[in-house]
Every structure is written in structure tokens, then in C-alpha cells.
Image (cartoon, coloured by chain):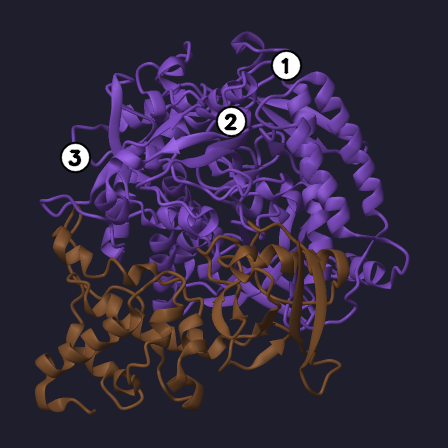
């Protein structure tokens, strides 16, 4: 079938303003939107830039706005857009560097600030023991691929650049609820501020768009509950 | 721009990151990655990491070593297999200590499951050896090692592409890289270079590999006149989603999934009576192709079914959720209700840059090249021989990545600063200018899709002299066509167009070595199957292939296989 694409283009070397450009592509129903993008780039217009790598939703490179919704181009199929025009734009909230490519440096910096590593002393000779139930607590958070769809979709993050954002909070959750970690209290305190965990006001957009189906909002609320229970009056809502 | 670092590591997957952790304290280390580190392809590994922990049932490292040797069809260097099997145990505990969220047994130990070719008591029956975190084991190990890199404040050059390896008079002096954001070419002067650039499955059309897997590091070693080892051994994973090539982990069969043909028959019972669907990948891929050729593909077509419907929803959700979501997203299939259409997909390269057990790159005389190291899929130790076993690759990455890092650390004490060649970036800059200035030329994508067709049609699971000869002629014609490759994008910022054109040089160069080595090896062993030479021939061919560009053409030579404990015998499962 013939598909019509409208892609928001911007080249910092040439353009003052972004603009839409239209492309027609032949595609099979079962193909991915990423396949169509590649076909445009490879056969029609090599100046188009975007990120991609694994092409099956495990690396997190090709997050963008597809018909108004943040998603991975490798997870959306042609048949999902039957007959419609497909509009591709860069992820909102972030600074556009070129075409569909955005500056994720501030995003990764916030993830790194969550200290995404285990803090624990004196490991035994073999593995630490952890019950399957305890392991299960982080079972959904470990799916995060840092694609930033959630931040792009978050109404709070769109308005307030200081909001820590959903993905960094999922990273915090991942360690707060790892029973092997010994820095739980400090980790709770670290996100306990108005633009931290309390910045979330339950729009649930992150949960709706997450390509790995992580219950992001639920995890954020679980952190809030832990802060209320464990830090008591210290909470800075 | 020129930079200087004691150590430069190219590739931020598991091997590169694990190697880096050995040198980051005490040396100035730079990590170069084509993609943001957590996008590295190690993250796509699903099923598990092999180590004889014996958490679920009795196991021993000797059995693991034996399986690795037999799985590699006796081309595996047995000293390397011994290191792998022994050290994997320590490595998995270390990963757990770093925080990898492994699934757990009821007693809280690391959970383990069955995987292809892993057996108890030297082949008696399948054994549970793969330590796993659902079906995203590579992903969580990558995140964990990256977290360690963050903790230690590692300097990372993200979205920098390797474009040249500076080797002069047998000594490496650094690398030349391209900065995606600016189009600027940088020279990094270094005392030691560790290549951890991964595989090169993008030589083939249908592959589980990511777009970044173009084998740049491997090709630049070859271009510098150093040998590559065992390039004919290309692994086709039996269960790629039909048409797409997206991987469906072997753990699906480890958890009890079975392959079925158009009669609904579990055909692996005939090909591997003892371990059936958990036979090694080369065997299962050939079995699938044999079924398809005999007209027993589903609906007479070119795929078979992977049936997980009897595993139950809970097990699929707990242990195989990612692949279940792939089936749902790409095929609209509920794995609890319907079988998955699968066919072999190019997955892993057993061959690569020859190294010793400590990651030192060696030349055709087995002498180390001072300052140059390689680890991971780009390297050939050779610990996987003619066919890698599933879940041995993650073990390889962390075991031999660490060893390479340790050896680098030891040698750095003595390694002086090498002299950079005059105008080190000249060749790269001239190439980029030439490609950009060419007005009447051909797009890289046209040449690349012809390469994909040639390699997939003529040099895959089944091979023979005639097809390989045609493949060689065609690849050489494509190399000719490549001389007039051109790009639409002449800009500097985020010009992925020019990078794809430059990567194609690596892909074509590597494709030629694969075909040449496949033509040369007149026997069938592991993943290399010659229909005109269907038997393994230990008298003539129990040896590694080395291929080298001498300046006066291509030269093929050989290297003996290290055999310590296990004498070659017939490979039956």
C-alpha cells in the first residue's frame, strides 16, 4: 500500500524554523514505521536524520512522536495507521538537534543522578540471597530502556523543565525497591522534593505511552507512599 | 581535533564496559560508542548467561567446558573453553554483587534454565545452566555495568564512530573517530586500544543484529594488514521471527517450547534424539532448513512453528515476557494461544580478530601487536570454535572483557606513548570529502541491499562451491560499484547518510573474507556446512583459518587448534 508521511524537518545548518515535508512510501501492512523511515532515507532523501539501532524495541533509540503520541518507530506497524497520514515529529520537551533527533544529554544526566548502581557492602562469596517475591518488586522497572517516551509525553515535564521526570523516577524505584540496596533512605530523600517525586500529579501519560508497559505512574505513587511511611513528617509535598 | 588518553575502548557493550572497569581507576580511559552506551547490542541478549552454579540441579564446570568444545565441533580452543567454564561462575556472582536482578529460585539463589547444547555428565541429558533475568538478561547486565561506569565517572564519547585504526610498524598509536553531532573528525592518541565493536550480522539481510553491527573494528584490523580468524563460521539462530529476523530466545525452548513442522510433528526428535529441541543452534537451523526443503514448512512455505502454547500464561509472563510482546506487536499473536512462525536468522559471528586468552590481538605468527586488544564478539579467542552455544556469549563478554582489561592494566605500566603517524586523519578526511563531493554516484543502500541478497542466497546455512564462487564474483563487483558511492546529505550535523556509506566499506570487506574462507574450507563443521563436502574432516581441517590482506593480495593460512582434555569424536546429540 501507499503511505503518506509528513515529517517535521529541521537542519540547524540551514533552517531558522522547523517545517513539515511530505513523502509517499510503498509499504507492506506488516512493516514497521521505522522500515518506512528507512525507505524514505535510503531511496528518496538521505538528508533525513533520526536515531535507530535494534529495530525491535529493546535499545530505545527511535523514540519520536507518531501521530501525536510518543512511541518507538520500530514498534508501530503500518497496519496500525491504515489509510491514515502518518505525522512524525521529534520527542517533545527536548531540544531538537536535527529533524527527529533530540538532545538527550539532560535526560541521561538526570538518570545518572539517581545513582543507577547498587549500593551494598560485604558481598558473600556466592550470590546474595533474594526471595522470588522480593525480586518481583523490581520486575517491571528493570524493563526500562531509557527511550524517554515517558518524559516526552509527560504534561508536567513539558511545562516544567525542573521536574525530575518519569524515567529517572523509574530508575530511582528500581533501586529503592531492590532489597539488596543499603541506601534506601537516602534514595527516598533524594527524590523527596516538589520537582522530584511530588512533581507528578497523576496524568498517567507516561504509563499510556511506555513501550515496555511499565506501570510508571503506579511506581511513582509507590515511591510517594514509601516516603510518607518511612520519612514521615519530612515529606516535602 | 586531537585528544590523548592512556586507553581508548571502542564499544560500550558488555565486553568494552567490563574491560573498562579494570583500567578506569589509575588510568585515563575513554570509552567510544556509536550509540549511547545503554543502546549497545549486548542489551538485546535475552535468554541467559551460562555458568555451572548448580543452583537447580547438579552441574560442573568440566561439563560446561565439554559442552563448549563439543558445541564448537572441536574447533574450540580448549584452554579458552576451560577459562570460560571455570571463570563464568565467579563472573556471575560478581554480576549479582554489582546488582544484576537475576530471577531467583525458591531458596533465593540465582535461577537457572536449560539452553541449547548444555548437558549434564558429558552429554547425558539437558542441564539447567543459563542464569537469567526473565528474557532480558543482556539488557539488565548492560544497565548494571553501565551503572558501574557511571559510579566510576567514566569518560564516554557517545555517538562517535570509529573510522580508522592507526597502526604503524606493528604498533597501534590510536584511532580516528567521527563525531556524529558535528561531523568533526577526531584523532585519539592512546597507549592502548581495546576493540569491543561487536558482531557484523548486518552483512546478511535477515539478522537479529542491530543496525550498528557493521564490524568496523574487525574490518579496520584487516585493512591494516592483520589477520582475521575463522571468518567462515557464521551462526544462524534457528528461531528468528519469520521475515523480520527478530530473535526469539532459545530460552523459549529451554522453558519447554518445541518446534513443529506442517504436520504438527516435533521434528527435532529425529535430528537430536537425546536433547531434541535443545540441540545446538547449527544443528537446529539445519534441521529447520531440511524440513522446509522437504516441503514440511508451514503451508509448504519457508518457516516452521515454535509452539509455546502449553507453557501457560504465567510462565510466559514471568519468564518470556519480552518475546511474547514481540509476537504480539509484530505478528498479532498471543503466544499462549498460537505458535510463532520462525526461521533461521543470522545471529552471531564465531570468527573475528585473533586474540590470546588475555585479549591481546595476535598477528599471523601468533605474536601480540603491542597496545592492541580485542574482546567480545569482534574477537576470536577461539572459545566458540565452529558454533557458539547459547548463553556462552554473555559469559564470554564478561570473562574475557575482564581479562583483556586486566592484561591492559598490566602492560600499560610498560607501554610507552607511541608516535602518531604524520597526518593521522588524512585518509579519513580525504574519503569523506571524496564521497561528499561525488555528484553522479550510487546510493549506499542500493549496493548494500545487493550485498544482503548475495550473502543470504549464496552463503547462509547451506553452502557449496558454485554458489560461493558466484557470491565471490558478486561481492567483488559490489566493491567496484562501491568506488562510486555517493550521498544526498553533504551537511555536517548528524549526517547518518555519510556514516552508512562509510560503514558499507567495512561490510563489503568483511563479506568478502566470509565468502573466501567458506570457499576455502572443504568440509562441514559446526555452522559451516558445505553440501559438496558434507562431512567433518579432522585430518585435513581440524585447524583455524587465518585470512590476511598482504598488500599483494589475500593470503590464507592456518593455526592449530588447542586440544587439552577432549579428543575430537563424532558429534551426536
Residue at (53% x, 63% y) in the render: A62
- The 10 Å Cα crowd at callout 2, few under 14, some 14 to 19, many 20 or more, is few
Label 1 in the same subunit as label 2: yes
Place of residue A80 in the rendered image (x, y in percent of width and height, measured from the top left): 51, 59
Question: Is B410 placed above or below B176 here?
Answer: above
Q: Nearer the viewer, residue A42 or B176?
A: A42
Quadrant assignment, res A98: bottom right
Q: Nearer the viewer, residue B326 or A95?
A: B326
Q: Quote the CA–CA distance across marks 1 and 3.
A: 42 Å
Residue at (44% x, 60% y) in the render: B38
Quadrant assignment, res B396: top left
Q: Secondary structure at mark 3?
A: loop
Q: Secondary structure at mark 2?
A: helix
Residue bearing the label numbered 3: B56
Total numbered labels placed on residues in the image: 3
The colour applied to the residues of chain A in this rendering is brown
Visible residue check, residue B422 = no
Q: Which residue lies most toward the right here?
A: B440
Residue bearing the label numbered 1: B522
Q: Quote the CA–CA distance across marks 1 and 2.
A: 35 Å
Question: Is A190 placed above or below B71 here?
Answer: below
Place of residue B259 in the rendered image (x, y in percent of width and height, measured from the top left): 39, 27
Left/right of residue B34 with respect to residue B509 in the rendered view: left
Residue bearing the label numbered 2: B299
- The 10 Å Cα crowd at callout 3, few under 14, some 14 to 19, many 20 or more, is some
Label 1 in the same subunit as label 3: yes
Amino acid at each position: 500500500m501507499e503511505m503518506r508521511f509528513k515529517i517535521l524537518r529541521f537542519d540547524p545548518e540551514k533552517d531558522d524554523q522547523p517545517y513539515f515535508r511530505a513523502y509517499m512510501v510503498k509499504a507492506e501492512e506488516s512493516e514497521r514505521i521505522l522500515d518506512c523511515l528507512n525507505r524514505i532515507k535510503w531511496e528518496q532523501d538521505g538528508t533525513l536524520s533520526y536515531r535507530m539501532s535494534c529495530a525491535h524495541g529493546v535499545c530505545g533509540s527511535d523514540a519520536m512522536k507518531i501521530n501525536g503520541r510518543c512511541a518507538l518507530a520500530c514498534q508501530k506497524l503500518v497496519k496500525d495507521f491504515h489509510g491514515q497520514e502518518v505525522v512524525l515529529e521529534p520527542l517533545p520537551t527536548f531540544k531538537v538537534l536535527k529533524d527527529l533527533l533530540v538532545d538527550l544529554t539532560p535526560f541521561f544526566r538526570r538518570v545518572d543522578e539517581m545513582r543507577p548502581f547498587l549500593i551494598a557492602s560485604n558481598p558473600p562469596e556466592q550470590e546474595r540471597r533474594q526471595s522470588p517475591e522480593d525480586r518481583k518488586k523490581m520486575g517491571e522497572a528493570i524493563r526500562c530502556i531509557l527511550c524517554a517516551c515517558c518524559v516526552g509525553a509527560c504534561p508536567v515535564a513539558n511545562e516544567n523543565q525542573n521536574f525530575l521526570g518519569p524515567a529517572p523516577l523509574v530508575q530511582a524505584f528500581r533501586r529503592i525497591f531492590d532489597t539488596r540496596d543499603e541506601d534506601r533512605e537516602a534514595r527516598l530523600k533524594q527524590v523527596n522534593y516538589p520537582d522530584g517525586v511530588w512533581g507528578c500529579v497523576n496524568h498517567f501519560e507516561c504509563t499510556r505511552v511506555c513501550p515496555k508497559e511499565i506501570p510508571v505512574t503506579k511506581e511513582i505513587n509507590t515511591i510517594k507512599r514509601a516516603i510518607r511511611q518511612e520519612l514521615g513528617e519530612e515529606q516535602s509535598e | 581535533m586531537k585528544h590523548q588518553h592512556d586507553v581508548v575502548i571502542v564499544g560500550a557493550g558488555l565486553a568494552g564496559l567490563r574491560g573498562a572497569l579494570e583500567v578506569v581507576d589509575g588510568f585515563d580511559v575513554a570509552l567510544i560508542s556509536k550509540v549511547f552506551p545503554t543502546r549497545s547490542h549486548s542489551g538485546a541478549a535475552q535468554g541467559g548467561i551460562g555458568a555451572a552454579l548448580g543452583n537447580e540441579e547438579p552441574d560442573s564446570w568440566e561439563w560446561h567446558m565439554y559442552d563448549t568444545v563439543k558445541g564448537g565441533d572441536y574447533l574450540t580452543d580448549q584452554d579458552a573453553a576451560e577459562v570460560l567454564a571455570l571463570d563464568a561462575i565467579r563472573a556471575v556472582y560478581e554480576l549479582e554483587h554489582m546488582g544484576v536482578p537475576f530471577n531467583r529460585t525458591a531458596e533465593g539463589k540465582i535461577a537457572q534454565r536449560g539452553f541449547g547444547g548444555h548437558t549434564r555428565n558429558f552429554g547425558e541429558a539437558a542441564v539447567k545452566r543459563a542464569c537469567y533475568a526473565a528474557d532480558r538478561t543482556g539488557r539488565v547486565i548492560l544497565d548494571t555495568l553501565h551503572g558501574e561506569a557511571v559510579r566510576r565517572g567514566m569518560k564516554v564519547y557517545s555517538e562517535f564512530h570509529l573510522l580508522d585504526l592507526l597502526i604503524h610498524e606493528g604498533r597501534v598509536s590510536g584511532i580516528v573517530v567521527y563525531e556524529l553531532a558535528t561531523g568533526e573528525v577526531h584523532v585519539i592518541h592512546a597507549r592502548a586500544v581495546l576493540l569491543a565493536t561487536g558482531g557484523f550480522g548486518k552483512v546478511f539481510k535477515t539478522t537479529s543484529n542491530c543496525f550498528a553491527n557493521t564490524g568496523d573494528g574487525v574490518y579496520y584490523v584487516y585493512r591494516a594488514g592483520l589477520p582475521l580468524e575463522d571468518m567462515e563460521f557464521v551462526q544462524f539462530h534457528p528461531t528468528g521471527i519469520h521475515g523480520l529476523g527478530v530473535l526469539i530466545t532459545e530460552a523459549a525452548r529451554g522453558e519447554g517450547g518445541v518446534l513443529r513442522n506442517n504436520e504438527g510433528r516435533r521434528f527435532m526428535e529425529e535430528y537430536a534424539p537425546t536433547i531434541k529441541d535443545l540441540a545446538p543452534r547449527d544443528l537446529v537451523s539445519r534441521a529447520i532448513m531440511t524440513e522446509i526443503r522437504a516441503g514440511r514448512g508451514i503451508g509448504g512455505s519457508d518457516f516452521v512453528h515454535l509452539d509455546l502454547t502449553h507453557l501457560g500464561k504465567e510462565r510466559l509472563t514471568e519468564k518470556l515476557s519480552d518475546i511474547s510482546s514481540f509476537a504480539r506487536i509484530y505478528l498479532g499473536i498471543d503466544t499462549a494461544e498460537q505458535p510463532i512462525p520462525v526461521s533461521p536468522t543470522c545471529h552471531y559471528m564465531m570468527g573475528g580478530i585473533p586474540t590470546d586468552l588475555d585479549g591481546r590481538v595476535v598477528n599471523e605468527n601468533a605474536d601480540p601487536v603491542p597496545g592492541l586488544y580485542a574482546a567480545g564478539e569482534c574477537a576470536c579467542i577461539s572459545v566458540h570454535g565452529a558454533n557458539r552455544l547459547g548463553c556462552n556469549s554473555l559469559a564470554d563478554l564478561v570473562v574475557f572483557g575482564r581479562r583483556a582489561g586486566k592484561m591492559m592494566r598490566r602492560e600499560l605500566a610498560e607501554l610507552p606513548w607511541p608516535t602518531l603517524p604524520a597526518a593521522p586523519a588524512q585518509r579519513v578526511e580525504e574519503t569523506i570529502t571524496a564521497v561528499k563531493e561525488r555528484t553522479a554516484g550510487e546510493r549506499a543502500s542500493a549496493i548494500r541491499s545487493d550485498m544482503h541478497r548475495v550473502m543470504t542466497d549464496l552463503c547462509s546455512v547451506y553452502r557449496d562451491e558454485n554458489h560461493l564462487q558466484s557470491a565471490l564474483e558478486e561481492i567483488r563487483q559490489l566493491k567496484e560499484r562501491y568506488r562510486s558511492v555517493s550521498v544526498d546529505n553533504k551537511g555536517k550535523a548528524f549526517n547518518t547518510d555519510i556514516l552508512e556509506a562509510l560503514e558499507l566499506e567495512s561490510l563489503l570487506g568483511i563479506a568478502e573474507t566470509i565468502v573466501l574462507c567458506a570457499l576455502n574450507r572443504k568440509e562441514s563443521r559446526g555452522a559451516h556446512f558445505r553440501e559438496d563436502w558434507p562431512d567433518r574432516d579432522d585430518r585435513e581441517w581440524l585447524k583455524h583459518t587465518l585470512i590476511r590482506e598482504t598488500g599483494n593480495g589475500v593470503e590464507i593460512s592456518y593455526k592449530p587448534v588447542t586440544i587439552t582434555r577432549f579428543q575430537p569424536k563424532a558429534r551426536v546429540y
